[in-house]
Amino acid sequence: MSDVNPTRVAILGASGYSGAELIRILLGHEGVELVCVTSRSEAGRCLGDVFPRFRGVGVADSLKFIEPDIEEIVATGAQVAFLALPHGVAAGFAGSLLEAGLKVIDLSADFRISDAGVYEEFYGIVHPDPALLAEAVYGLPEVRSGEIAQARLVASPGCYPTSVILPLLPALADSLIDPASIHVVSMSGTSGAGKKADASLLFAECNESLRAYCVPRHRHLSEIEQELSIAARQKVTISFTPILTPVTAGIYTTVYAAAQNGAQAGDLERSLGNAYGAAPFVRLLGENIPPDTKHVTRSNFIDIGWAYDSRTGRFVLMSAEDNLVKGASGQAVQNFNLMSGLPQTSGLIGL
Amino acid sequence: MSDVNPTRVAILGASGYSGAELIRILLGHEGVELVCVTSRSEAGRCLGDVFPRFRGVGVADSLKFIEPDIEEIVATGAQVAFLALPHGVAAGFAGSLLEAGLKVIDLSADFRISDAGVYEEFYGIVHPDPALLAEAVYGLPEVRSGEIAQARLVASPGCYPTSVILPLLPALADSLIDPASIHVVSMSGTSGAGKKADASLLFAECNESLRAYCVPRHRHLSEIEQELSIAARQKVTISFTPILTPVTAGIYTTVYAAAQNGAQAGDLERSLGNAYGAAPFVRLLGENIPPDTKHVTRSNFIDIGWAYDSRTGRFVLMSAEDNLVKGASGQAVQNFNLMSGLPQTSGLIGL
Amino acid sequence: MSDVNPTRVAILGASGYSGAELIRILLGHEGVELVCVTSRSEAGRCLGDVFPRFRGVGVADSLKFIEPDIEEIVATGAQVAFLALPHGVAAGFAGSLLEAGLKVIDLSADFRISDAGVYEEFYGIVHPDPALLAEAVYGLPEVRSGEIAQARLVASPGCYPTSVILPLLPALADSLIDPASIHVVSMSGTSGAGKKADASLLFAECNESLRAYCVPRHRHLSEIEQELSIAARQKVTISFTPILTPVTAGIYTTVYAAAQNGAQAGDLERSLGNAYGAAPFVRLLGENIPPDTKHVTRSNFIDIGWAYDSRTGRFVLMSAEDNLVKGASGQAVQNFNLMSGLPQTSGLIGL
Amino acid sequence: MSDVNPTRVAILGASGYSGAELIRILLGHEGVELVCVTSRSEAGRCLGDVFPRFRGVGVADSLKFIEPDIEEIVATGAQVAFLALPHGVAAGFAGSLLEAGLKVIDLSADFRISDAGVYEEFYGIVHPDPALLAEAVYGLPEVRSGEIAQARLVASPGCYPTSVILPLLPALADSLIDPASIHVVSMSGTSGAGKKADASLLFAECNESLRAYCVPRHRHLSEIEQELSIAARQKVTISFTPILTPVTAGIYTTVYAAAQNGAQAGDLERSLGNAYGAAPFVRLLGENIPPDTKHVTRSNFIDIGWAYDSRTGRFVLMSAEDNLVKGASGQAVQNFNLMSGLPQTSGLIGL
């Protein structure tokens, strides 16, 4: 239906949950031709066999997984590569793909932290390709659409960070809250842990279970604090506790922050409205209206509600997103759209 | 098996979830003879018909629900009455039952708030029987076992309050945390909302859903702050956000509080150990060990873990309990045991 | 993007689960302009307020529910009306809408049973408009695409019937199975029971619960046997047991039928292939490959697997569909597409 | 509380779900002293560390897992051993334990099939110890309480078999149904698959999923048909399809069977009543009353309902049990009680 040729796209590491979600979105994206999917474990099998959901749709019955070999990937004619690989692995591919002339959208953490030392501190490994860090753009479209549109290498944000940064950023930038007062609790669905055979993620272990993990220092703190600090124009350190909950998809984030400079609910609403009035995927629900993850699953929306508690002088900010869509693959496609000169919403309007 | 005669017990409002859980526990309690269950909606039907789970067990096939009429209740010979009635309703029964010589354990909020004005502020009604407030004992067995043992009227604490108060109390009493720094997020299963035909509680509305509610001021704040203030010897005001999660049973509470006076994890551990070393239903898991609701469901345990975050100077306290057991009916039976001179654990050792 | 004008569409009874699913699909359908949604309970509120999932999408923030008044519906210029109303109610609207020149797609049972006596037997009420029964077409697109394309009034099949009829029809038509040997067990998600405030459908009642209902005679037997009898060219009577399972969406059907005339797995596969080779929404998985509801939820696909048990001489047929999509609203849109001269897949390719 | 000394008990393979359930029950069993638990993977850790649910209960904080070494097991003084080991492995231990003077209750399939050839056919391995088959008693207490009470080696039945055999046995024995007409569909919770790190059992793969497996020939057919054939006094072959459903615990079985000799619902009810009137764990719900798994989870009950469909002349039998309790560990303890001269209900009355 489009006059222009679709962009040829490769997905590296397409057999996990983020990869599958990318495939789901891209199979319905009119501006995309999916030409390459890689997976060490599934090489040789076609998309529809690995993911029965996709059988009979587009190229799913013909396109086969290949090994993640740079030459073979380049030979498919791919113009853009999505990296849905583990951290530490993704950075090993980015440089070669860029050299071969592809643009790269990385869903791992490898290019999100601008400081290689902080990366090493939180991820426990020396950064595999620190030279690329300066070029990489932290791909939060609501904040850096211009930079993203010009970028060759975009680091698409993590699921928790997106859910924490977007509600907080305007209030920090507008000095409505005390940067030292931020307390966050986030609940996530189990797909966030990936498709790995781990007994603690079995249905019988997650069903009827609520449990915190990575207390008190989750890796995602590094990129959350990096971005909040930029907005606040000062170093921001926060408390963050992730909770595993028995839903497949979804992240629900609750943020407390102390109001300052006399800010109240109306000020917060104006600040959010100014920041996101034109953002197609941020829905501002209103004061005292909590979001609900079931209204955003499988869509690229993030819903934000808020309240002001006059008893404590604190704001409560609440956000809901699908961890695999706005928290991963949908946001990556939103970045792709910006990099490709397409409307941000291309391929992402499905509910 | 016991030498002494069992106590004859009545449950008023036995057709809801708390009532059913009371029945479940009391049917297996050797020190109890269940002689009366009331329910306006189920009057005339026997226990086993209303709750198929209980068919064939003890008196379940013979004991019939009656209307909640004081004379009829007294006529059953009941010595102790559990009130599993809505707030505002429970208080209408307590006085008459006490006059008739019964002891009363109220699971509603009616006698938890010692100040009738605060009750009216949070519950929106004038207290039905304020004269009894002075006599009522807030029934947290880990804190007031002596008073409970002497009481005629015990107000058994709410589910959220138990999960918040128990982890915080020792730290507040020992001045390890700043009372003005408390931020709480609690997740609850849907049974906490009761067995009422409300479309927002349908399976299809709760499954794959995470959502906050009653933001920013939940009713349970009143009793939480009352008890924390007593422990801290000053007025304590906190932030509290409840989240509805797709589990049937369980509450998971995460508390942030700023360390003060140089307190660190070891100090907190000692404080908790001193407070609860002899408490049969508090399990202290250890530093950086988050609890998991699936390990406490259907038991009367509350599991507590903690962490100290040196980056922020804050403690994280986490607790897990079954909202219907330690958060309601199990705790009520624990109070019953104390009031009856039985071991706290009688009838409550089941896993 | 289309050259032709979109069709103006009304949905009557749009506030339930089938109605919401229709809205979800039609908001993304390029050949449709949604001009009217009715609901007695939600009249006056806009789509996005009633269904937060739709906020910010298409007309969701501007289109308001109206009362189901024929004149007002006609005044919106609607050309096609979907009836997502309870049985008995839908038939009261169909005639007037047809008279006003609209085409009607009824998702209720009212026009599925060609014999008004059978309708009365199974639904317990006299048919409200039997004169229209002769004209109504049972809208299984895989069986009657030609008739549907010409119809003014289409009775879109029920969720269980679609899941039972599609796997069985070819084998019956080709005389591969004994029509007297059919035994069916179907499992359904709770959304199939509708969005009604019924305590037995609460999360706490459905979670961790498996239970049969309407044993031994469910209403859907009437349309299942009607369609199977047509295919078999003889009266077919079957056994059917529906089971409520804790999923929101999905129907899983297991069918046993005795092979006859020496039929084996290969014969069944050929029969299914001949019948559905060109059907865009039937996916034939293969011998001994059971379907899985999670691969079809939110899509209009029905997945079918089968096995031949030489020990008993019986076939096992298994199907999986989304009860609200292929089992209700997706199929209704598939019928709409046929009636509108559009490809069957218009607006239905989303995954 | 008991006058007699408790029996010293060992559990081999105690780290899986059946083993954990055995521990849960035996920790509350007054006639049992748990003296030994084995697990290759958990050797050296105490019960409460491996299963946080058990912390603080009985011996859970002191008893440590040991390697499954016969000498060490015998050295603990154990008088009875429960084998919660995989099939093929259990049979390797039984003989040595019997020789050492222990009684053995095997929860695996190893001693359930009296014909070693059938075992090999269905389990794909040569039976490790066929000489013991003649001595082993198939431990269905409702059928063979006398033999069980005398046995040294009891093969405790599987979860599916218990749910299928108990409802069918009386009707077959009393010739009310045609043995050639049996069609079974059973739904199981995921704990039935065991605690193994298998990606297909992850929460994100099982949630919102219904799927058949092992079609058309599940291993449990061998013991089901063996027992049904004994009751029917002829070879019985049935159809059986297991379905994996998103519950942790529970099996729901639906059985169709053609009435014969003019049998109707009343005859079936009498037959069931005669067979199970004195069975403490079989609850006969009544005609047209389907059971519900949520009423039997964590209890040793099996609930049975039934219907007669005059349209087809077939009975529908429905049963619900907890797959880990009546379907495994509870039944094993029921057998233990019989073998120990205790009431069948000892330690099993918990709800």
Image: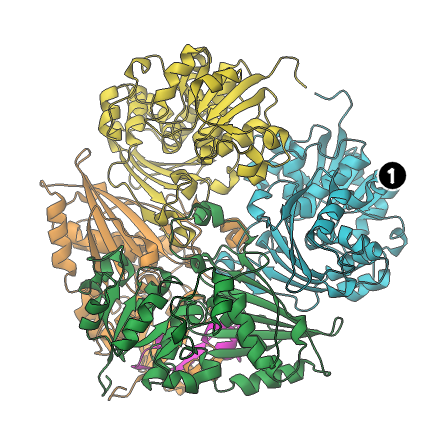
Chain colours: A yellow, B orange, C cyan, D green
Q: Is residue A348 above or below residue D109?
A: above
Q: Is residue A297 above or below residue D65?
A: above
| Residue in front for this viewpoint, A296 or B156 | A296
User: Which quadrant is home to the C terminus of chain D?
Assistant: bottom left
Asked which secondary structure carries label 1, the reply is helix
The residue sitting at 66% across, 68% down in the picture is C215
Residue C149: percent from left, percent from top: 84, 38
Crowdedness near tag 1: few (<14), some (14–19) or many (≥20) residues, C-alpha within 10 Å: some
**Number of numbered discs on residues:** 1
| Residue in front for this viewpoint, A56 or D150 | D150
Residue B253: percent from left, percent from top: 30, 50
Task: Output the chain of dot 1.
Answer: C
Residue at label 1? C150
Instruction: Specify whether residue B38 is painted magenta.
Output: yes
What's the amino acid at mark 1? Gln
Relative to B240, C317 lies left or right: right
- Point out the stretch of residues depicted in magenta: B26-54
Q: Is residue C155 visible?
A: yes
Instruction: Specify whether residue D322 is painted magenta.
Output: no
Relative to B156, C238 lies left or right: right
| Residue in front for this viewpoint, B230 or A96 | A96
User: Which quadrant is home to the N terminus of chain D?
Assistant: bottom left
